[in-house]
Amino acid sequence: MELRVCETENNRDRTGNSVCNEDSILEPLCFPEQPADGAGAPSVQGPSLQGPGTELLVCLFCPESVSLQQKDVLLKHLLLEHKLVIADVKLIADLSKYMLYWKGRFLEQPVTDFCSVIKTNSTGPVEKQEDYFLLCDVLPEDRILRERLQQKRLEEVLEQQQVERDDGSFHRLCMFCSEEFAGNRSSLLNHMAREHSFSIGLPDNIVYCNQFLDTLQRKLDNLQCLYCEKTFRDKTTLKDHMRKKAHRRINASNHEYDRFYVINYLELGKTWEEVQSEDDRELADDEDDDWSDWQAHPVSAVCLFCEHQSETMEQIYTHMKEAHGFDLHKLRTELNLRFYQQVKLVNFIRRQIHQSRCYGCQEKFDSRDAVLRHIAAEGHMMKLPDVSTWNQPQYYFPTYENDALLCTLSDSDEEESDETNHGEDVPVIAEDISNLRALKQSSVLNQLNRSRALNN
């Protein structure tokens, strides 16, 4: 086997018209997402999970040491000066402790007791042959060390995550509107997702939240788009770009964000993308076509009046009825609403609440909380305006792009299906076109044209 040393440089690259009035929604709205099993989290690559840190990496053979951020310098030093290669460095959870452990072991025993020996230029002259050493997890001791470091790192991350979840001293300004939030981090994250369509995931999927937000804030302060990472001349241009291009999201290909998502610490050497790929291969290899045990991921629908979410539609209907006195089933029955009428009604109510306006009396308020208090106090929960107010084509379009409530509405009557069935029984008689010239001369359209000509 011939080993060749070379240096490479890796470079990574990291519209619709609107009506201009005070009630227009000029950007897409979106409920906070609930990714299943960490979907949407960025992939793991390199030692990014270890954070910027100030730890030192020590050479396994000499006093040489570098900071963690300069690990490539040390790895090159090991290769050129000591002819040693460490396999799968990116999968080592704590490289600093890993290096310290093996430095001690190499002082106790020869390196050949632990490493595979690779002879270069094996077919060439003996004087040009060199021995290189490979340290990898084929060695049980190395594998156990890597697993222990991974387990230790996971425990630290989960402990840190729990501290952040229980922390009530969180205090920060929204990076988009400068609204102040205090108490728990979830209030700010949910606000950015709900009001600015900017979601970095559910709070429970995130760790080192303050560092994450600091990283995003620095990019915005440097006039850098969070998604395409281009730099702009001023804040107004940046804001317009992110809104028009729907770039109010982070770039999952930027591995700088990896260490802020818990999923990237869960399994040694596996990213969420690799786990998903393995699952897909297993499904492809499975010849059993029995889907009897298949279960769909539960739909998470959001209440019309608060942030409550339920996994079944009966639960969300029950919640709205018991908590807010709003009975959608009753309205559907009393007003004999068909499917698309229900869609327009839900979108109408969503939009009115978003714009802090009572949908029953059309009174405008300063905030969402104020209008909800008014609706409850005045008993306007079940009060709807005239049908012509909400039964408009504009309300075919969802107020929130991912509104699962719209997907579960049902038709209250069967007239549509009955009409369809009756239509199938009506015979269709083809028009006799044997004398096409006479047909054209006697057609209604031709008669209208002649009448118009006479009148003119």
Image (cartoon, rainbow, N blue to C red):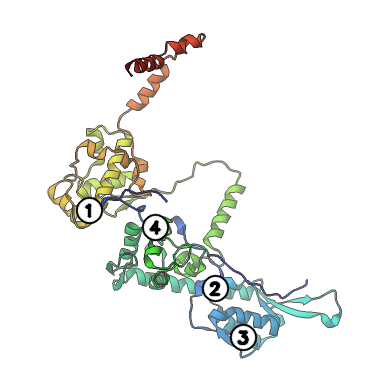
The reply to whether the C-beta atoms of the residues labelled 1 and 4 are less than 8 Å apart is: no
| Quarter placement of the N terminus | bottom right
Numbered badge on residue 426: none
Q: CA distance from mark 3 to mark 1?
A: 63 Å
Could you tell me if residue 388 is visible in this image?
yes
Nearer mark to the viewer, of 1 and 4: 4
Q: Image point 52% across, 60% down: which residue? A: 272
Q: Earlier in the sequence, mark 4 or mark 3?
A: 3
* On screen, residue 449 above or below 185: above
The quarter of the picture where residue 156 lies is bottom left
For the residue pair 267 and 123, the one nearer the viewer reads as 123
The reply to whether the C-beta atoms of the residues labelled 4 and 3 are less than 8 Å apart is: no
Furthest residue toward bottom? 63
Residue underneath mark 2: 47
Q: CA distance from mark 2 to mark 4?
A: 33 Å
Furthest residue toward front? 456
Q: Earlier in the sequence, mark 1 or mark 4?
A: 4
Nearer mark to the viewer, of 3 and 1: 1
Kindly identify the amino acid type of the residue bearing the numbered disc 2: Pro
Residue underneath mark 3: 59
Residue underneath mark 1: 356
Residue 29 x/y as whole percent: 35, 53
Q: Image point 36% across, 50% down: which residue? A: 300
Residue 175 x/y as whole percent: 34, 67
Residue underneath mark 4: 243
| Quarter placement of the C terminus | top left
